[in-house]
Image (cartoon, rainbow, N blue to C red):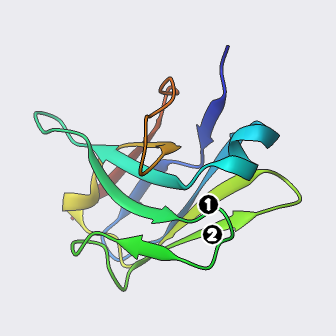
Amino acid sequence: QVQLVESGGGSVQAGGSLRLSCATSRNIFRLRTLGWYRQAPGKQRELVAFISVGGDTTNYADSVKGRFTISRDNAKNTVSLQMNSLKPEDTAVYYCNAAGGSVLQWGQGTQVTVSS
């Protein structure tokens, strides 16, 4: 049963912006801290940002701090990641999932490619 569906990826030039969105079930959205992860070719998956259930706490990896913004939409049960000032090193497959506890079944992810 698919519970996490990511969308919004694409190809942009360095300095550009993308907005990723993750749709999830109402139960997951209401009960779990949610995060965005990414996995670049040949590298381990890393957590780049997370947001608490209430949306009052966010945290970012140093590599994206000041450029990425995570948010939650309570009406739509979605978690978004606004990515600005993109760099080639941001190129990866991006996934959303629970953070701070056991992860859920991974979705298909969405590819982000940043060219120099």
For mark 1, give the secondary structure. strand
Is any atom of residue 94 visible in this view?
yes
Q: Mark 2 points at which residue?
A: 71
Residue 80, x across and y down, in percent: 62, 60
**Residue at the (25%, 40%) spot, across then down:** 45
**Residue at the (77%, 63%) spot, across then down:** 73
Left or right of 28? Residue 33 is: left
**Residue at the (16%, 38%) spot, across then down:** 44
Pick whichever, 56 or 11, lies toward us: 56
Nearest to N terminus: mark 1 or mark 2: 2
Q: Image quarter for residue 48?
A: bottom left
Query: Mark 1 touching mark 2, by CB under 8 A?
Result: yes
Is any atom of residue 84 visible in this view?
no
Few, some or many C-alpha atoms within 10 Å of disc 1 (few <14, some 14-19, many ≥20)? many
Q: Name the residue under label 1.
A: 80
Q: Quadrant of the C terminus?
A: bottom left
Measured in 3D between alpha carbons, the distance from the residue under mark 1 to the one under mark 2, in whole angstroms, is 5 Å
Pick whichever, 70 or 89, lies toward us: 70
As drawn, the residue found furthest toward the top would be: 1
